[in-house]
Amino acid sequence: MSVPAAYLGVILIWSTTPLGIQWSAQGASFSFAVMARMLIGLVICLFLLRATRTAFPFTPAARQLYAISGMSIFVAMLLTYWGALHIPSGLISVIFGLSPLVTGVFAALWLSERTLTPMRLAGLGLALGGLWLIFGQPWPGDGRATLGTAAVLAGMTVQALGLVWIKRLNVPASSLAITTGSLGVATPLFVLAWLVADAAQLPPDITPRAGMAIIYLGVFGSVVGFTLYYYVIKHLDAGRVALIMLVTPVTALLLGQTLNAEFIPARGWAGIALIGAGLLLYEWQALRQLSGQAGKSGV
């Protein structure tokens, strides 16, 4: 696989995922949309696991890993899908762009990693200032935009906590095995949530766009995107990987405005700019190393 192609694939998939989440709930409830997505992803993972004969550890430590990862996926995605009903899709990407900062805080507190340098703390402060501006905005919607923003923010936080917890466990397993085990835990919970929320009623008037969005997210958002991301991590340095988090919020915002006619107030753009500046400061050291490598290579 070409590394540049995988890199561009990650940016494309992560840029379109928030919009796909919104479209998938058109004509269908959010609980059905996320349940159907995860069910498709699980089926594909099981097929790939068997086709590639990838080892699937089932030791007590591995089962604990799958349980923690699956629970974090369940809580994070359920909150995100509900929040996506009430806020612009581009804002979802901006909030999830904060995940490196939140993950760094959890890693410093829980794993005793000395990652919170003064510059990174300054970046965290800028990003929090941007969030404060965003929460004060009268976003277009049904009056629940503030709750929707809070739900997506909570979902992102739970996902970051799950990632740090997985790292703390340090169980040897392939990315495909971890994804399969995690979805194996999460998918039944999504089915249960759908049964409780919708009484097992199938959507009567799901739109073709919603159906295609669910399939797209099940195949690309749940399986292909993470596979490409793990591939990129293995072959590129931290600076180049960090650029993904800086690029995808911008492209997601542009897609939301172009394809979904989303409106973001001026003060909201100021908050988004502060978050972007905070991310830039947070990843500054990695980006400087990237710039130095490019200079030495004559690029």
Image (spheres, helix red, strand yellow):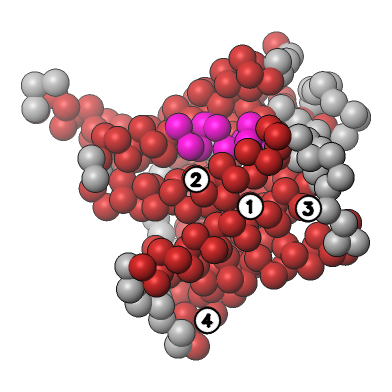
**C-alpha separation, residue under disc 3 versus residue under disc 4:** 26 Å
Q: Earlier in the sequence, mark 2 or mark 4?
A: 4
Q: Secondary structure at mark 4?
A: helix
**C-alpha separation, residue under disc 2 versus residue under disc 4:** 25 Å
Q: Is residue 269 visible?
A: no
Return the x and y of residue 245 as percentages of the image width and height: 45, 35
Q: State the residue at coordinates (45%, 32%).
A: 12
Work out whether 266 lies above or below 88: above
Instruction: Name the residue carrying label 4.
Output: 63
Q: Earlier in the sequence, mark 3 or mark 2?
A: 3
- Residue 134, located in which quarter of the rendered image? top right
Q: State the residue at coordinates (45%, 74%).
A: 169
- Name the residue nearer the viewer: 262 or 50: 50
Q: Is residue 97 visible?
A: yes
Q: Amino acid at mark 4?
A: Arg
Q: Would you call the spot at circle 4 few (<14 residues within 10 Å), some (14-19), or many (20 or more)?
A: some
Q: Check if residue 36 falls in the magenta segment.
A: no
Instruction: Name the residue carrying label 3.
Output: 31
Q: Earlier in the sequence, mark 1 or mark 3?
A: 3
